Amino acid sequence: MAVRPFLPFEDRRLHTPAEPVAAVTETVRMIWDDMIETMDAMPGVGLAAPQIGIMLRLAVVDASDKRGQAVRMANPEVLHASVQMRAHDEASPNLPGVFARIERPRAVTVRFLNADGAIEDRDFVGLWATSVQHQIDHLNGRTYLDHLSPLRRKMLIQKSKKLARV
């Protein structure tokens, strides 16, 4: 297992949809292991493969109070989203030093291939749901900044660049 470097925000891969995973293989399991180690090193509650330059629809999420509860997902898709919204400050290691309050559905039902390669439908609520939706955005070539106005997005990008120079 290894901690992988993050792509810079400007990298086109972060703004390009990832490719579906045909099957859960040993290679996929090794990528998930690296992703969990990388997520824990941030520290963060989720990571999508494109964030570290792997253009596959793979994500990991662990919003538990103690680590070791990571959910490994291939090809996750939201089947149902609650009407009730939840606001949360979101950030990304691809754009360090900044964050924004984003509203997303409070709960979602997600279908994905799990670590055993089986199709699983699972309900996520609260921070788990926020993180899953954030990761699915990454898999679709979107970031949390795409939920903001163009002016707010530009301000956060400029602030992150300024912080990187200091």
Image (cartoon, helix red, strand yellow):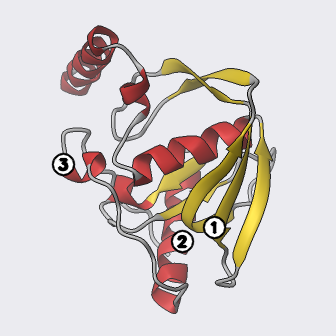
Residues under labels 1 and 2: Cα distance? 14 Å
Q: Quadrant of residue 125?
A: top right
Instruction: Please report the residue visible at 33 percent of the width from the left and 51 percent of the height from the top.
Output: 6
- Nearer to us of marks 1 and 3 is 1
Left or right? Give the position of 122 relative to 55.
Answer: right
Quadrant (top left, top right, bottom left, bottom right) of the C terminus = top left
Residue shown at 36% from the left, 57% from the top:
50
Image: 104 above or below 94: above
- State the residue position of label 3: 12
Does residue 41 appear anywhere in the picture?
no
Q: CA distance from mark 1 to mark 3?
A: 25 Å
Describe the element under mark 3 as helix, strand or loop.
Answer: helix
When the figure is inspected, residue 119 is found, relative to residue 39, above or below; the finding is below
In the rendered view, tell whether residue 97 sits above or below residue 43.
Answer: above
Residue bearing the label numbered 2: 32
Q: Earlier in the sequence, mark 1 or mark 3?
A: 3
Q: Secondary structure at mark 2?
A: helix
Q: Position of residue 53 (x, y in %)?
A: 30, 61
In the displayed structure image, the side of residue 96 where residue 159 appears, left or right: left
The residue type indicated by label 1 comes to Phe
Measuring from the top left, give residue 8's x and y in whole percent: 24, 43
Q: Position of residue 86 (x, y in %)?
A: 70, 23
Residue 24, disc: none
> Which residue corresponds to mark 1?
112
> Whole-Å distance between the Cαs marked 3 and 2?
22 Å
Side (left or right) of 85 relative to 28: right
Disc 3 marks a residue whose amino acid type is Arg
